[in-house]
Amino acid sequence: MRHLPLRRRRSEPYPLTKSPPGPTAAGFFVPPFPLASRWRSHTLTPVKVLVTAGPTREPIDPVRFLTNRSSGKMGYTLAGAFAHEGHSVLLISGPTSLDVPEGIDYIPVETAAEMHEAVSRHIGRMDIAVFAAAVADYTPADVQPQKIKKAGETLTLE
């Protein structure tokens, strides 16, 4: 797998794509189809691309979980763009309401540990990896086997 440096080396066959300047942060999101097509135009054959997307959910008990509001749209759009350009795409995604783009291999995951395990299992065979998932920042130390009964106004997790 290649990790692109911040500065392009002369021997580096793939272009770096910088966001155009804009009013927020470093700029606007680079459109996915031109991004994916740049990879296609600089390779003789399609490449294998791993994309992570969506949120992860960390269980507290069988009913509750910690998560974030990630929709997964960026990862799914990038996966679709790479597939559209003829690349072989593996999408590893947490729970979303999105349909998996056509022609993409898909591995659904729930937790950060499941995502880590799936990525670790497949990354060695990939040429490119795009990490667009919003992995949960916290994992409870103990998952309760039954629903936690309400016992006051607050709940403290470790």
Image (cartoon, rainbow, N blue to C red):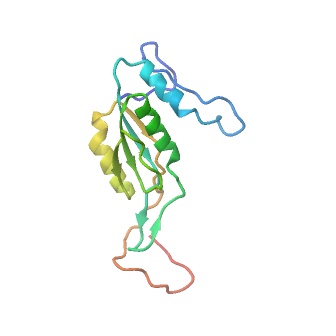
Q: Is residue 41 above or below residue 54?
A: above
In the picture, residue 19 is in which quadrant? top right
Give how far across and how far down residue 48 sits, in percent.
34, 31
**Circle count:** 0
List the single residue furthest toward the front.
Answer: 102
- Residue positioned 41% across, 29% down in the render: 3
Residue that lies at the very extreme toward the bottom in this rendered image: 151
The one nearer the camera, 148 or 84, is 84
Quadrant including the N terminus: top left
Quadrant housing residue 27: top right
How far from the left and from the top, in percent, is residue 61? 39, 74
Q: Report the quarter where the C terminus lies.
A: bottom left
119 horizontally vs 54: left or right: left
**Which residue occupies the foreground of this view, 23 or 7?**
23
Residue at (54%, 86%) from the top-left corner?
A: 152
Identify the residue shown where x is 28% and y is 34%. Answer: 125
Name the residue at the top extreme.
10
- Residue 21, image x and y in percent? 68, 30
Q: What residue do we see at 40% from left, 80% from top?
A: 147
Note whether 16 is above or below 59 in the view shown. above
In the shown orientation, is residue 24 left or right of residue 140?
Answer: right
Q: Is residue 142 above or below residue 31?
A: below
